[in-house]
Image (cartoon, grey):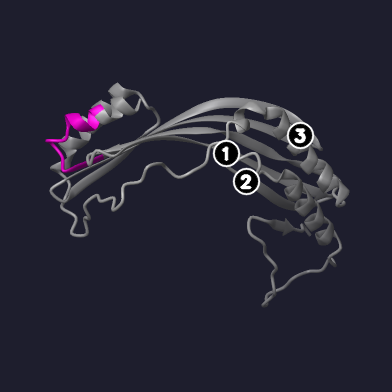
């Protein structure tokens, strides 16, 4: 794949000052849960390509939902033809790397794909931890997978890498009161689903103990945490 993308850039190098192609293939898996039990599992693949070309202080960008070489090549040719209709950008800055990177951002842990049972165990741990903190029921989703990435540009830089990911969102309920927490990681070791369950359950229990009263116009103190929320419906 990387060789094909680099070939597209090489073929137009005399027609543009700069060119960049970034393609991504992402393998997704999702497990939804409701009423404290997993309910739906799904798998799918997404594709994305971003293109940047520049010439004479004019530039264009485009995005495609494919990584097909022929479609990308055709789109690049189309963009080159359109460049002459684009006004020059007085703030245009040429592509530079400083020290050329050797890899793309992200970490890869093969266990995120191969050890699905451990991920499911983590999801169940989160649910049980939330119940132990006082929630009545829990719902949410766990998403995990691997992103394959390919980068090439007109300076000759070529990068090929992949990164894993896992995200759990758990929403705890007591009657109509809810609280949400998450655990996000690139690796299995960094995935802390039980902590997310504890926090969601603790927050919804705290919200239940708050007095029920009407709130009018005014100034109030609000307690917030990163990626955590608690709500009370009156």
Position of residue 51 in the picture relative to residue 180 (left or right)? left
Q: Residue at x 28, y 22 (%)?
A: 70
Tag shown at residue 135: none
Determine the secondary structure under disc 3.
Answer: helix
Q: Residue at x 22, y 59 (%)?
A: 91
Quarter of the picture holding the N terminus: top left
Dot 1, crowdedness within 10 Å: few (<14), some or many (≥20)?
Answer: many
Q: Are marks 2 and 1 in contact (CB under 8 Å)?
A: yes
> Looking at the picture, how far across and down is residue 211, in whole percent?
85, 67
- Disc 2 or 3, which lies upstream in sequence? 3
Q: Which residue, given by chain and number where applicable, does mark 1 sit on?
A: 165
Q: Is residue 11 magenta?
A: yes
> Looking at the picture, how far across and down is residue 35, in whole percent?
81, 37
For the residue pair 233 and 9, the one nearer the viewer reads as 9
Distance in Å between CA atoms under marks 1 and 3: 17 Å
Give the quadrant of residue 14. top left
Give the quadrant of residue 193. top right
Distance in Å between CA atoms under marks 2 and 1: 8 Å
Q: Which residue, given by chain and number where applicable, does mark 3 sit on?
A: 121
Position of residue 133 in the picture relative to residue 66 (left or right)? right
Outermost residue toward the bottom in this view: 219
Q: Which residue, given by chain and number where applicable, does mark 2 sit on?
A: 184
Q: Residue at x 35, y 46 (%)?
A: 101
- Disc 2 or 1, which lies upstream in sequence? 1
Distance in Å between CA atoms under marks 2 and 3: 16 Å
Determine the secondary structure under disc 1.
Answer: strand
Q: Is residue 126 above or below residue 214?
A: above
Q: Which residues are magenta?
A: 7-19
């Amino acid at each position: 794949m990387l060789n094909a993308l680099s070939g597209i850039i090489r073929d137009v190098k005399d027609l543009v000052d700069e060119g960049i192609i970034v393609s991504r293939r992402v393998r997704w898996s999702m497990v939804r849960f409701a009423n404290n039990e997993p309910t739906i599992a799904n798998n799918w693949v997404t594709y994305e390509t971003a293109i940047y070309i520049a010439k004479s202080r004019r530039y264009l960008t485009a995005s495609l939902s494919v990584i097909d070489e022929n479609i990308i090549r055709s789109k690049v040719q189309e963009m080159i033809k359109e460049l002459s209709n684009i006004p020059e950008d007085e703030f245009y800055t040429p592509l530079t790397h400083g020290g050329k990177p050797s890899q793309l951002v992200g970490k890869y842990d093969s266990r995120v794909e191969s050890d699905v049972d451990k991920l499911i165990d983590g999801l169940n741990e989160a649910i049980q931890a939330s119940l132990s903190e006082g929630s009545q029921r829990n719902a949410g989703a766990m998403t995990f997978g691997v992103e394959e990435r390919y980068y090439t540009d007109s300076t000759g830089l070529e990068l090929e890498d992949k990164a894993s990911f896992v995200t759990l969102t758990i929403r705890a309920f007591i009657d109509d009161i809810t609280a949400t927490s998450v655990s996000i990681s690139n690796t299995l070791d960094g995935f802390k689903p039980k902590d997310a369950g504890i926090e969601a359950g603790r927050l919804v229990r705290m919200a239940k103990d708050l007095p029920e009263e009407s709130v009018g116009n005014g100034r109030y103190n609000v307690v917030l945490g990163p990626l955590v929320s608690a709500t009370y419906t009156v």
